[in-house]
Amino acid sequence: MPNKSDSQTKTRWQFYVSTIRRHLATLRRALDHKTDVTRLEAESTIFRFFRSRHVADLRMICMLAVFFIFFLIIISPFLIWLAVSVPGEIYRLELTKFLLSYIGTPFTACVAIIAWAYLRASSRLGIVDLFACEISTLCRVGTIVDVATQYVGQYGKAADGTAVAMRRREKASTNFVSEENYFPVFASNSKDLQVLEAEVVIDITAFYTYMKATRDTLRKLSSSAATGFQPCERDAILETLMKMLFLGFESGRKAVQNLIEYEPVKTDVTIIILLTELKCFSFLMEHEESIKGAVYERIKLRRSDYNDLMKALERKVALGLAKCKTDPKRPNEWEKAEIALRALKEVYKKALAAANQGSSESIHKAMSGKNHPSLETVEGA
């Protein structure tokens, strides 16, 4: 009869072998950039260490350390043979000590470098996730409450004889002062941005700057009710607010596209942000007379970019849905993006119509000699 201890030892060894095989399979899959990752794999640090653009420098340092370890392993047999073949026991002992110190120390240092690079990558990816979560959540909240539609609906109402009613409605919020910190991640971790790439840092900083400018404009809009605002002054504040919202959501979209690397989530968040961004763009295109000049022309240039972006989003969503249909076991993570894309198409049609209408009016005024370009400030546009 087989011994019980032998069967336990065999089971233990089988467990070790299966664990090693599983880890090797995970490592092989992480190194294969041609395969699509699942949601759990995309959230795994080991997968992101080998694939994320944000830790490319740390990955290169780690690879150099690994190559050096392989180099030491390759030359070690030759050095050992050299130490054994040296005549004289004293010389052989001294050479062995020399080899152990000058091979063992670099080997240990390389292992320490690999561990350091992995820990630094994990910390950096945590910073990336924090900023991606805060920016996407703030933009998602703005889309959920439909902030763009609310302020577009208020524009020009005073000119229709409703200034008194609007003043009464806004008087309740006259003493409103926004003291809440809506950007805790940026306030606490702004110094950590220096480890990220320049393009990512620029988009993140621009988003928070425009959002703070938006909050200051909202405070000015709220205080205008107490000072007995004129309709034209209030509309001018609303125009500034829409500009800041547009630029803020545009910067947030660019930041999210750089921060989030899992395609289903990145596509979904991009569409959610565009729902508000395109509404602001449509408003700015419809009010060429108030914006005018170089600011209007620079904003209008986004039209071709939005056209390319919409085609890319439609292509990504269609490809993602097709992959989910071919693999029934794979969870369909593109459904949310598909639903949001339907709403985005309607908003895009209105924005495109507003841009085309603005362009036709500009051509008509230019031909009639009534439109003279002005050299206004173009900061931020």
Image (spheres, grey):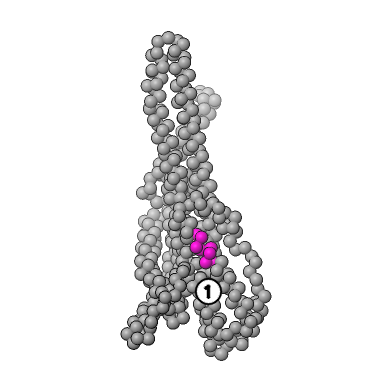
Residue 114 in view, yes or no: yes
53 or 379: nearer the viewer: 379
Q: Which of the 4 quarters of the picture holds residue 96?
A: top left
Magenta stretch, overall SS: helix
Q: From this view, report whether residue 136 is shown above or below residue 214.
A: above
List the single residue furthest toward the left: 367
Residue tagged by mark 1?
241
Question: Residues in magenta?
Answer: 204-211
> What amino acid is found at the position of numbered circle 1 in the picture?
Leu
Secondary structure under badge 1?
Answer: helix
Q: Residue 72 in the image: x percent, y percent?
A: 41, 28
202 or 104: nearer the viewer: 202
Q: Residue 243 in the image: x percent, y percent?
A: 49, 73
135 or 243: nearer the viewer: 243
Q: From this view, report whether residue 326 is shown above or below residue 165.
A: above
Q: From this view, report whether residue 205 is shown above or below residue 192.
A: below
Residue pictured at 53% horizontal, 64% vertical: 209
Q: Residue 127 in the image: x percent, y percent?
A: 53, 52
Q: Residues within 10 Å of mark 1 (few under 14, many from 20)?
A: many
Whether residue 164 appears in magenta in the rendering, the answer is: no
Q: Residue 183 in the image: x percent, y percent?
A: 58, 61
Whether residue 209 appears in magenta in the rendering, the answer is: yes
Residue pictured at 45% horizontal, 10% vertical: 89
Residue 348 in view, yes or no: no
Residue pictured at 40% horizontal, 44% vertical: 31
Q: Which quadrant is home to the C terminus?
A: bottom left
Residue pictured at 44% horizontal, 51% vertical: 38
